Image: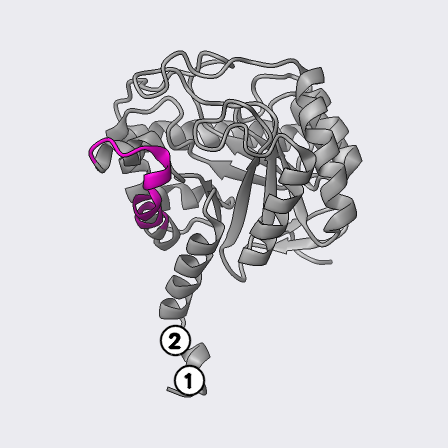
Amino acid sequence: MELFDPFRLVLHDRLLDLRSRVRIMGILNVTPDSFSDGGLYLDPDAALRRTEEMLQEGADIIDVGGESSRPRGRFYGAGSQPVSAQEELRRVLPVIEAIRRRFPEAIISVDTYKAPVARAALEAGAHLVNDISGGSFDPDMLPTVAAFGAPIVLMHLVGSPGAIVQEATYIDVVAEVKAALARAARRAEEAGIRYCVLDPGFGFGKRPADNLRLVRDLGQLRSLGRPILIGVSRKSTLGLVLGGKPPLERLYASLAATAVAVLEGASIIRTHDVRPTVELVRTLEAISHPEKFETEPA
C-alpha cells in the first residue's frame, strides 16, 4: 500500500508533485477592481490570451478569481466590495470552461470562499480551490471540496469579506498564524479533505513588519507538515519598502521576497509576474543542486 504524502497532490486527472520542484501559480483575476490588474481580463478571450502567456512562461497552475479581496486600509481605501455567488460564477465559469477546452494540460485553481462557486468550478474542470478564508467563511466549503476529493489552499486572514482589515495586532505573528493554520488544516482533515496547502496570508490582516517577519520566518510553518503557498506579488508592504512605488513598479521587491520564501521552504509561489518568478526559482534550485549541471558544457 502506497503511503500518503501531503506534498504529492492527487488531482482528479493528474498528480502535482510539490517535492520535485517549487511550483508557480499564475494569477488570473477576472475582476474589475483587483488592486493590480483589475479589469484587464474580464473578457474571456483576454483571459485565454493571458492564460496562454502564463503557461508559455512556465506557470504550473492558473488561479482564476472572480472577486477582489483587496483589503481596506491606508493603501487601498475602502477596499473591495463583495459580489454575489451568481456574479462570481458569471465571471469565472466561462473562463474555466474555456481554459479546459483550449489548454487541457493546464492545472486550474479557483480563488473563492463561496461553496457554490467552488462546486460549479470543480464540476467545470477546476482541479483545486484557493480559499482566502481558510474554509471559515462558508460552512459548506470544506464538505464541498471533500465531496470532490479536491485539494484546498487554506489562507490566514483577519476580517470578513469587504472588510478585511489591513493592520491587525499580534504579539508573535508567526506563532499566531502558525496556530491558526494548524486549526484550519485540522478542520479540513475532519471534513474529509486529504490534501491541503497552507498560506500565511501576506498582506491580509497584518502590519507591514508582520508581513516581512512572515516571509523571513516562513520556515517555522514547515513543522505543520503541509505544503506552503505564499503570494507576495506586488503587495503594498513591498511598495512601502520601496518608498511608495505603485504595484507595477514592485517587481524586484516581489522577487526578493519570493527568493527568501523559496529558501525558507515554500512549495508554491502565487504571482502576477510568471516569467521572472520562474527564472528566479529555477536559478535558486540550480544553485541548491549544482550536481545536475556537472556534465553541461561551460
Nearer the observer, 84 or 119: 84
Residue 155 x %, y %: 49, 30
Circle 2 sits in a helix, a strand or a loop, which is it? helix
Residue 174 x %, y %: 32, 33
| Distance between mark 2 and mark 1 Cα atoms | 7 Å
Figure check: 68 above or below 54: above
Does any portion of residue 217 appear in the rendered image?
no
Residue at left offset 62%, top offset 42%: 195
Splitting the image into 4 quarters, where does residue 125 fall? top right
Please state the extent of the stretch shown in magenta in the rendering.
243-258
Residue at left offset 42%, top offset 44%: 223
- Is residue 124 found left or right of 113 in the rendered image? right
- The main secondary structure of the magenta stretch is helix
Figure check: 35 above or below 193: above
Does any portion of residue 254 appear in the rendered image?
yes
Nearer the observer, 68 or 43: 43
Decide: marks 2, 1 in contact (CB < 8 A)?
yes
Residue located beneath label 2 in the image: 290
Q: Amino acid at mark 1?
A: Glu
Nearer the observer, 96 or 150: 96
Q: Residues within 10 Å of mark 1 (few under 14, many from 20)?
A: few
Residue 165 x %, y %: 38, 16
Is residue 256 one of those drawn in magenta?
Answer: yes
Splitting the image into 4 quarters, where does residue 92 fall? top right
- Is residue 249 found left or right of 32 in the rendered image? left
Q: Determine which of the numbered discs, if any, sits on residue 294 in the image.
A: 1
- Is residue 282 found left or right of 107 in the rendered image? left
Residue 56 x %, y %: 59, 57
